[in-house]
Structure formats: structure tokens, C-alpha cells
Image (cartoon, rainbow, N blue to C red):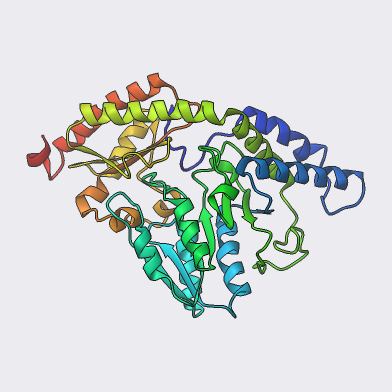
Amino acid sequence: MIYLDNAATTPMLNEVLDEMMPYMKDNYGNPSSIHKLGRQANNALQLARKRISTLINTTGEIVFASGATEANNLALKGLTNSMKNKGNHVITSSIEHDAILEPCKELERNGLDVTYLPVDKYGMIELDELESAIKEETILISIMFANNEVGTIQPIKEIAEIAHKHDIVFHTDAVQVVGKIAVDVQALGIDMITLSAHKMYGPKGVGVLCINNDLKIEPILHGGGQEDQIRSGTQNVAGIVGMGKAAELSIQHMDEYTNHVTKLRDHLIDSTSSEIRFSKLNGHPTQRLPSNAHFTFLGVNGEDLIIKLDENGIEASTGSACSIKKQKASHVLMAMGFNYEEITGSLRLTLGIQNTIDEIELTVSKLGIIVNELREISPYKYKYT
């Protein structure tokens, strides 16, 4: 099997699992308990917080959640609830993950005003349009660090500067970025940032919202207030330990990871573009994740392509695994101005540290054969064969 769906989830590293195992069996204490087992569990949580803080260079508060979806909901709903006396306007982009777009729809149902910024053909927002969208009532700007489908990286530092110039809080969903490229929260001016463990070779079911210490966030889950009264619920100690270890490994191997995956991505893009006719790279040509290569193959249905690749031992996707569950066309590609044929012919190949150059060459070879086979039975055959 050649696994090229790392944007959906990454394989958990052995070192991560090894560090988690004691907390899944022997060190089973509740971190809120004051006895020895409880203290051991709590100490493990604090070590994980320290490791994650170091990874993103922040002095802000690390709040553990069940995943990035909960963390994003906490960021949007918690912040707007705490600042409702100041304003009721939120700005986001039209290509956010559903974990941002769906909470924004909920905010609208509750009377808030939400602006969805358009993007250009590369999936990039325009800074002038962001500035023009700001109102006196604007209290939050939430723009993803990098898009999960096409890999485009937004100008995060410039967005933060615009937000702060107008005394607006800036949040970014950085799920696809942290652990893949260096992220410095303080240097970039990020007020709130969302992370996910299973996108950085850690376990599923753990996420983080990091909050600037100057911000007040109201909880959206009410109970014991285990996470400093911001998030209630007994913490997933083993999962959090795993996320902390994944963060530590990311710090140690960041340059190695980035260089390795970038070389694979560039080889994949160059080989595909030169060897497969009527193929087009999507997303920004340079401001993109080192792990992402998103293509359109004209005259081919993307779902058929995924099935044929799977039959040949290659795991890929057309886009967000979360959106596929809803059986809907990619809102990202629609926002980028793609037509129906371009959207349905899309393929996302996302790389990880476990992939090799031999896997890339084999993938391109098989991909070319499959694309030609599918074009032979396509209603667009007359155009692309």
C-alpha cells in the first residue's frame, strides 16, 4: 500500500505509541485526583502543554479538547459570547474547513453577522478585501493557516497585523500546518490557534486551542471545568501524552521533515505535469504546504480515479474526508472559480515522512495508466484522448 492521504490523517509514530502505552494501562489515574496516580497523570498533561507551547513558541494557554472541531467551536463561540457587548461581526473565508463554516452558520442563526471573504484562483484571500470587510462591530477574524484541500498558505502575519490595527482578535485553524512547517505564534501575532494531534503523527481524538493570555473565552461545555474552567470533561490523558510526544518529535525533526516531503512533492508535481496530459496543479504554485499536491485531470471523474487507485494499492482522496461524508461538491474549488468538470476531476495527494521517492514514481506511473483508461470511457473522450 502507498498511503498518500496524510492530510486526512497521519500514521502514528512508534515513539508516540510507546509513550502513550503506560497511560492506557498502568498510569490510569484521573488527573484531577490528588493521590499519586492522579498527580502522575496531571504531570503528564503539564509536560504535554510545555512541549506543544515550545513547538509553536507561545506563552498562551494550552486548552485540550476532543479534537480540532471542538477547539474551533470553542474559539468562535467562546470568543463571540465573551465579547457580545463589544460587537457581533465575524470575518472568515469561503474556503474554511467545515469545522469553521458550520459554527459560523450557527453564529448567524443566533443573530451574529458573518462575512465570508472570497478567494482568488489560487485559494488566496485579498488583504484589501479583508480590510474593506471590517466594521465597527467586528470582533473576530478567523482565517485558516493553510487550506486542507489545495494546500495554499495564507499571509498569516499580514492578516494578524490588519486585525490588531483595528483591535480585532485573530484566530487561525492551523491543523494542516503545525508539525509540517515551523509556526511561531508570537512572531506571527496569532491570538488563538487550533491544532490537531492526528495531523502531526499523533493519536486521533485530541486537539488544542491555544489562547492568548489577554483573552477571555466563555466555555461551550459546562461541567467540572477541568481545563482551567474553559473546557470541562476528564482529559484524554493517553491521547494528550501522545500529542505532546508528537510535538517534541516535530521540534527535533522539523527541518528533516520539511526537506524530505518538499522534495517528494516537487517530484510528484513535476512528473505528473510532464507525463500526464491535460493535468493541472491547483492551489498556489509557491505558497503551498510541502505535503500537498492537488490536481485536476480533465475528462476524468475523481471518485472513479480514487477507486481505481485504491484497487492498485494507492490511497488518495478528492478532498476533505469530513466533506466526503456529506456527498457534496468541494466548496473550496467552487470558491476558486472551478467549473463542474474541473471540480469532478480533482485529486488530492498528500505526503508524509513515511513516503519514498520510489512510491512517488510508482504512483505517477500507475496514475497515468488509470487516467488514460478512464478517459477512454469518459463522455469527454473526444477532447482528451
Rendering coords of residue 309 (x, y %) = 33, 33
Residue 211 vs 17, above or below: the answer is below
Rendering coords of residue 353 (x, y %) = 50, 28
Q: Determine the residue positioned at 15% across, 39% down.
A: 377
Question: Residue extending furthest top?
Answer: 358
Question: Residue extending furthest right?
Answer: 35
The answer to whether residue 130 of the structure is visible from this angle is yes
Residue 2 appears left or right of 269:
right
Rendering coords of residue 183 (x, y %) = 55, 43
Residue 281 vs 268, above or below: the answer is below
Rendering coords of residue 267 (x, y %) = 34, 26
Q: Determine the residue positioned at 52% across, 48% down.
A: 175
Residue 376 appears left or right of 39:
left
- Residue 318: image quadrant is top left
Quadrant showing the N terminus? top left
Q: Nearer the viewer, residue 278 or 147?
A: 147
Residue 225 vs 274, above or below: the answer is below
Residue 2 appears left or right of 276:
right
Q: Determine the residue positioned at 60% across, 49% down.
A: 186
Q: Nearer the viewer, residue 18 or 327?
A: 18
Residue 190 appears left or right of 22:
left
